[in-house]
Amino acid sequence: MFGLYKGIGSPMMGLTFVNAIVFGVQGNTMRYLGHDTPMNQFLAGAAAGAIQCVICCPMELAKTRMQMQGTGEKKSKRKLYKNSLDCLAHIYKREGLRGVNRGMVTTLIRETPCFGVYFLTYDILTRSIGCEPGDRYMIPKLLFAGGMSGVTCWLSTYPVDVIKSRLQADGVGGVYQYSSIADCVRKSVKREGLIVFTRGLTSTLLRAFPVNAVTFATVTLVLMYARGVEGPKDSEPATPVTTHHTQQQAQASSL
């Protein structure tokens, strides 16, 4: 059973910082841009996605290497890495800073538009289905909007993720198959055809919906209560908002 959780240490350590950076940068970028428009939501999300790559890339590298360690063995006879930090330390000692940031370019190509789509989808959905404070169905609506944002986000750049994962897995055991991003794309398509860009998509989408549903709903509700905005009610309908200023403050989609 422990085999199903191989490499969990890296996401457990890194995702807290990744989400803090993503939502922090997105919120501050929206305040800087001044207007809550779909284009600004996309730009703010893209900026957040690009900046968090500093943590995301080494985190996913460690996760990939830990998951590949002892593949096919019930009990690994020889473990090269004790844990995720030890894995990064080994890579740094052997390959330097460049090795720790292996796959950084593909991570940037994936994360920048991906998070733009992520926040844009959430904004459009929450406005369309009416996630207003006081709505008794607000939490299910937030969960749906967050889950669909995650699914859309992954669908938009999944082929890039396939290449990124292959580049980060390359070099295990000292054998390198790919010399560049283009070489990885060329060899992968030649061996497996275009279907290679959908490998692992089903499991990724099955994970994306619940994870992002909970993430977005939690962040939105915490921010609402922290700002003193009244949350969902059990029986009363949502109170109409009279002023433009109050409406702008209370809107659940405006993170």
Image: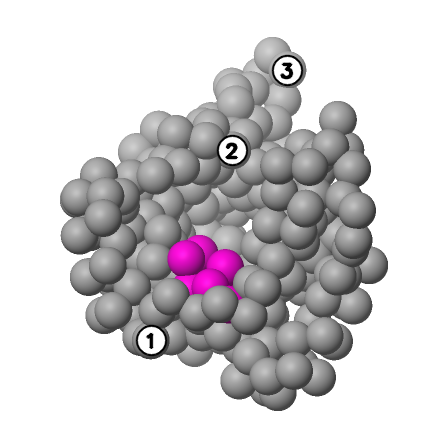
Picture disc at residue 110: none
Picture disc at residue 234: 3
Whether pointer 2 and pointer 1 mark residues with C-beta atoms closer than 8 Å, the reply is: no
Coloration of the structure image: one colour
- Secondary structure at badge 1 equals loop
Residue 239 image position (x, y, % from top left): 50, 29
Q: Image check: 16 left or right of 118?
A: right
Q: Is residue 234 above or below residue 47?
A: above
Name the residue nearer the viewer: 163 or 190: 190
Mark with earlier residue (3, 2)? 2
Mark with earlier residue (2, 1)? 1
Q: Residue at x 43, y 41 (%)?
A: 150
Name the residue nearer the viewer: 31 or 207: 207
Image-quadrant location for residue 109: bottom left
Which residue type does callout 3 highlight? Asp
Task: Give the residue number, with chain letter if any, for mark 1.
Answer: 179
Picture disc at residue 207: 2
Residue 163 image position (x, y, % from top left): 34, 58
Q: Is residue 136 above or below residue 223?
A: above
